[in-house]
Amino acid sequence: MDLSLIIEPNELQPYLGHESLLILDLGKSETYQQAHVPGAIRVAPADIQLGTKPAPGLLPSKEQLSLLFSRLGLTNDTHVVVYDDDGGPWAGRMIWVLDSIGHKHYSFLNGGIHGWLAEQRPIESVVNLGVAKDYKVADIDESVSINKEQLLKAIEDSSIQIWDARSYKEYTGEKMVSQRGGHLPGAKSYEFSKALDGENALKLRDLEEIKNELLALGINGEKTIISHCQTHRRSGLTYVLAKALGWPMQAYAGSWAEWGNDPNTPIETGE
């Protein structure tokens, strides 16, 4: 199946119904019930998060992921297309989850359901269930993620670039969602939603423009980029963007929920 990382609605439509295609909708339940891409199976975002404090955004266990992807009917040959109803953060997080389990056949539907509806593509409202398979997650690929201890060392060694996908007020510490506010030492602020075109069905803006804005901040892929937000939802989109730009990327899934609730982690505040 010749589908690239980021695909447009017109590229997906000819493949609808293809036996090796699995379309996953990570949008809200009510949106899915009203309209979804034909054949799409809804995945509750909670199914791709560990969900326990202080770091709810961590990856679920191998056992949980095996159960999920068995229910969805994933096989090694399946090409997965992901989308949501919010411009792509949950869909991007699912790309990271697929990378984590070593499944590399996937695409991100640009604009998600909004992009699909804007082009008046076919829709359905019936609830689809996967054809269950026995899918076993044997290993987790740790290379696509970084944990708190590794991050502390990487900050000390200046061996990474940090992309903070939260709002600017969260970055400066003006808005606090954890016990402590602020940002990781050396982190650059580029809120995930800046990459989206609100005038064009929440599709991604031109990748070259996004790239130039990131370069101006000093995010350039010359070192591994670490992306995070509060729980690794918003940074799901930045994970896909870095992949699309060909830049080395790791997700800090613990994100600010873990870092900002630890009294001993180094924090910077202000601009």
Image (cartoon, helix red, strand yellow):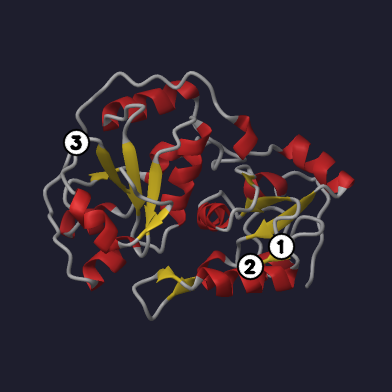
Mark 2 → mark 3, Cα distance in angstroms: 39 Å
Neighbours of disc 3 within 10 Å: few (<14), some (14-19), many (20+): few
Mark 1 → mark 2, Cα distance in angstroms: 10 Å
Q: Nearer the viewer, mark 1 or mark 2?
A: 1
| Callout 1 amino acid | Ile
Q: Earlier in the sequence, mark 2 or mark 3?
A: 3
Q: Earlier in the sequence, mark 1 or mark 3?
A: 3
Which residue sits furthest front? 2
Q: Which residue shows up at 66% across the image and 60% down it?
A: 164
Asked if the residue under mark 2 is in contact with the one under mark 1, i.e. CB atoms within 8 Å, the reply is yes
Mark 3 lies on residue: 19
Q: Is label 2 in a helix, a strand or a loop?
A: loop
Mark 1 → mark 3, Cα distance in angstroms: 40 Å
Picture quarter containing residue 163? bottom right
Mark 1 lies on residue: 219
Which residue sits furthest right? 156
- x%, y% of residue 24? 30, 45
Q: Is label 1 in a helix, a strand or a loop?
A: loop
- x%, y% of residue 136? 40, 19
In the picture provided, is 146 more to the left or to the right than 153?
A: left
In the rendered image of this protein, does residue 115 appear above or below residue 143?
A: below
| Callout 2 amino acid | Tyr
> For residue 190, which numbered disc appears in the image?
2
Q: Can the viewer see residue 31 in this picture?
A: yes
